[in-house]
Image: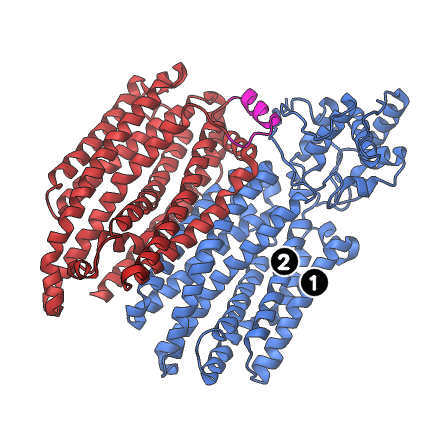
Amino acid sequence: MMDEMTFYPTHDFGPIMKGLVIGGLGIFHVFLAQFAIGGGMLMAYFQWLAQSGRDPGGTLRKFIDDYFKLLVLVSFVVGALTGVGMWFTSIQISPHTIGMMVQEFHWLWATEWTFFCVEVIAGYAFYRYGKQLPDAMRMRLLVTYAIASWFSLFWINGILSWQLTPGQWTETRDVWDGFFNPSFWPSLIYRTIVCLVIASLAACTLVNAIGFTAQQRREIIQRASRFLLPMIAMPVLGVWYLQVIPADSRQWVMGGSIAMTLFMNVAAGASALIASYAWIALWWQRLTINGATASMLLALAFVASAGGEFVREGSRKPYTIRQALYSNSITPERVAHLRQVGSITGDPYPVLSDVPFPTEQLRQGAQVFRVQCSVCHTPAGVNGIVHLAGSWTADQRRMNIAKLQHTKPFMPPFAGPATEVEALVQWIAWWNAGRPAQWAETTDETVLKSISAWLDSAGVEPGGHHR
Amino acid sequence: MNGIFPFGYEPATAWYLVLYLATLLLHMVLMSYVIAGSFWLVVARMRTWNSTEQREAKQTPITSVDILSDWMPFALGGAITAGVAPLLFVQILYQEQFYTANLLLFHRWMSILPVLIVGFYLLYIQKAQWSATKKKTGSVRRLSLATHVLVSVVAIACFGFVGYSWTENHLLGNQSNDVWSRFYGERRLFFFDGQVIPRLGIWFCGTFPTMLLILAGQRWLLRARESANPDGLTADEAVRKNNSLDVWQPDQMIMSWVGMVALAFVWIFVVWYGWGLTEQEQAAVFAAGVLPYWAVAVLGSVIQMGGWWRFKDQPMVDLRWITIMGVGLVLMMIGGLVLRELLRVSHVELEQWQQSHQKSAAVGGIYVFFVFLLLNIGVVIWCLRGVVKSKT
């Protein structure tokens, strides 16, 4: 007998799609976190240069102290709190997903926390006492900070990459099979390079804002820009990553889904521009870079990160955890059961509406939307279901929803009986008609039989190539 | 629960509860420093409103206000970092309750994050502003001081909102499905019941003895450093050093009295809170197996009271008593945290609750966690020792 489904009270974000909320915050957090990680490595490198006699004027030491101040003031505050914000936002958007992630990986997440503590303590110690410390001690703190911050990436990368490519974990349920999953290594190395890039571009921007001479700025920029050179490995890592992700996900980012393809190309294009500038202008031609150009490159890096994160999030569809949990928090095993008992059976939370429902069927339709659709769709805002299905006839809506996983392969199978399909269809039609005060309830048995037949023919398995 | 906490529970549940409470204790210590410290700063600065330049020159260069201002941002960063671990374990222990409360409070709950960001930056501003204020005189100084106090007051409001929200979240998570349904249906964003005020009272008053003990430790360290290098002092510094204990004595008296009064109020709020407990909650916190934790909490309070009383007429607390009072503080917190947790557990369906923990405990990675925990504690000690040695 199947356990009862846990229902949570869900909210909408007005016209904004929930994925945008979590994506928006995620991009911001990831960018700052990667800045913090790369910054540690860059500063450790600069410190090594300084203490090995390559900084006679003390330029690098001064720069390290100023850069670290920025790192602490920005990343330790906003970066850390947006990290907590990711947890809270994930709870708001998909409590089942974050619940499963915490369940499976809490010991590794706790391990990450220990490294986070080291990072914060070493970082603050350097920020506070760095100027008074001898070189060896400065190096100790910077290296400790760099290693600890990189390890926090190591642990979280395993957990996040597991969502798309759980690998052997699907059969074994072993934490290490899930952690060291197929996309773990390409994404870890790729992200490490991204950390170096962001840190380097931040350094190039910052150096123009501090009172260094032109010669000093040139020196720092030349050295910082070395951290851009590993970008040359990104195409190889990108290809490796594409090879290991599921075939359907790969298909979407390579043309199957225009939105995903666009984000992918934006990320790749922005990265290519930065890499070209780094290799040609900064390394080969030894040019320097002013604040405006550096800021623009940093903004491009942000755009590249944003594109990449959207692709990573979007390419998971129809799952949030591959083969374990669909985006709407329904497990694949539960679909057949919900086709019998209904997806809204046992949902204790009333349906909220600013407009009263003329019929009970419409209220049920709204509830079905909330449980099965609202995680990715709004009624009539971004990715609005009314826009997507508004021009369809009633029968098209019935069939397309009943066979959802074949309508669009990145959609999960509809997890409810024919009555719920019909309720959702009526609710879409009602919205499309401007939510009038009067609406007829549909009780045609022939219609329900057709829907049942479509549901049966679609089956409960996902559509597309799912492995 | 049968037996003494946590032994009355299944091993997996007991384990998670211990980890949760241990990490929460660490968070509470740092959080107390920030909350009580922010209040202390506002009051202490307002007391310097009429200070003359001449009077200030005679004072030791470093006061309690200087220490608190300086360390506040780090303490908040530490509190947030330390808070991540209990946040993780609470999701294992009370997943449905915690997530539901989060969801019900919606964007009001989410707003604690931008509020914390604002509060965090305000602490940095107050640190910089305080340094600037000390160098000013006359009406310019007063304006700077007023700005400084305003910044601190807004920071307190930020942290107060966060503390209130966490209390609300906790209490809302303890409610039944019916209450949750109704809360959601009514589109409420605030949950208020009779337990909010005494709970907040216990938390708030409890932050003061914690902060004051840490401050006492910081003052001791400062004094120890000053005494360690007498030859390095100029004549002015030597005079200030000789005067510093005299200057510190009134501060110590205020600290001691505030510590004692705050401890007394903690227990007043505990009694108030106890008055409003349901039968089920009363049974949970007054069971035989729980009495040792009451004893521990009381003992811890008595030890601290004794320490503050002893040192109310001294310029500072000595190291031995800082340690003794520290033990007392930890005992009081352990007792308080266990009792708090038992109240929460009294609202869950025990068997089902413990089964979910057994499932969680079956997941791998625990040995890796403990290995890296010990390793990273070692790394932190290695770094901090290196810093201390390098500075001396």
Is the residue under label 2 in contact with that under label 1 (CB below 8 Å)? yes
In the image, is B31 to the left or to the right of A292? Answer: left
Viewer-side residue, B205 vs A215: B205
In the displayed structure, would residue A81 be above or below residue A407?
below
Q: Which residue is mark 2?
A: A306
As drawn, the label of residue A266 is 1
The chain drawn blue is chain what? Answer: A
* Disc 1 to disc 2, C-alpha distance: 9 Å
In the displayed structure, would residue A118 be above or below residue A362?
below
Viewer-side residue, A20 vs A460: A20
Region in magenta: B176-190
Whether residue B9 is visible here, answered yes or no, is yes
Q: Residue at x 81, y 26 (%)?
A: A437
Determine if the magenta segment contains residue A87.
Answer: no
Determine if the magenta segment contains residue B181.
Answer: yes
The chain drawn red is chain what? Answer: B
Q: Main secondary structure of the magenta part?
A: helix
Tell me where residue B280 appears, x and y as whole percent.
40, 16
In the image, is A63 to the left or to the right of B325? Answer: right
Q: Of callouts 1 and 2, which one flags the residue occurring earlier in the amino acid sequence?
A: 1
Tell me where residue A12 appears, x and y as whole percent.
65, 38
Q: Amino acid at mark 1?
A: Val
Q: Residue at x 13, y 61 (%)?
A: B240
In the image, is B116 to the left or to the right of A263? Answer: left
Where, by quadrant of the figure, is residue B255 drawn? top left
Label 1 crowd bin: few (<14), some (14–19), many (20+), radius 10 Å:
some
Labels 1 and 2 share a subunit: yes
